[in-house]
Amino acid sequence: MYDLTGFQRDLLYVIAGEEEPHGLAIKEELEEYYEKEIHHGRLYPNLDTLVDKGLVEKGRRDRRTNFYTLTRRGRRELEARREWEAQYVDL
């Protein structure tokens, strides 16, 4: 997790919070959070990086639509990150 960008961590959180979201659903969630447009040229290369790192799996819903899910490793990494954050932030 330490080598991920903040954007990539946000992608993980969105994927974890949805059931097999497709790229456009992820894009819409992040646009709402960032309050600005997320370009495809930013979104999909970062999703591919997460797939390459073994944190996310990409599946195919149909010929045009992919969906994304966390791998076990991705889930463990998110849990470890949240535990680490909890050491410093107690809301």
Image (cartoon, helix red, strand yellow):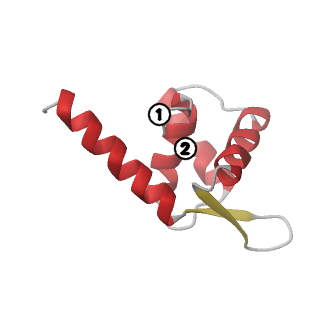
x, y percentage for residue 33?
Answer: 47, 33
Q: Which residue appears at 18% of the width and 33% of the height? A: 87
Q: Give the tally of numbered discs.
A: 2
| Circle 1 SS class | helix
| Circle 2 SS class | helix
Residue 23 badge: none
The Cα atoms of the two marked residues, 2 and 1, are separated by: 11 Å
Q: Which residue appears at 73% of the width and 48% of the height? A: 48
Locate the C terminus and report the quarter of the image it occupies: top left
Check if mark 2's residue and mark 1's residue have beta carbons within 8 Å.
no
**What residue sits right under mark 2 in the picture?**
11
**What residue sits right under mark 1 in the picture?**
33
Determine whether, in the image, residue 25 is placed left or right of residue 41: left
- Depth check, mark 2 against mark 1: the one in front is 2
87 is higher (above) or lower (below) than 50: above
x, y percentage for residue 67?
Answer: 66, 64
Identity, as a three-letter code, of the amino acid under mark 2: Leu
- Classed neighbour count for the residue bearing mark 2: other residues with Cα under 10 Å, few (<14), some (14–19), many (≥20): many
Q: Return the disc, 2 or 1, that comes first in the chain's sequence.
A: 2
- Classed neighbour count for the residue bearing mark 1: other residues with Cα under 10 Å, few (<14), some (14–19), many (≥20): few
- Residue in the foreground of this view, choosing between 84 and 58: 84
- Residue in the foreground of this view, choosing between 77 and 27: 77
x, y percentage for residue 6?
Answer: 51, 29
Q: Residue furthest left?
A: 90
Identity, as a three-letter code, of the amino acid under mark 1: Tyr
Q: Which residue appears at 68% of the width and 47% of the height? A: 47
Determine whether, in the image, residue 9 is placed left or right of residue 28: left
Determine whether, in the image, residue 83 is placed left or right of residue 29: left
x, y percentage for residue 42?
Answer: 73, 33
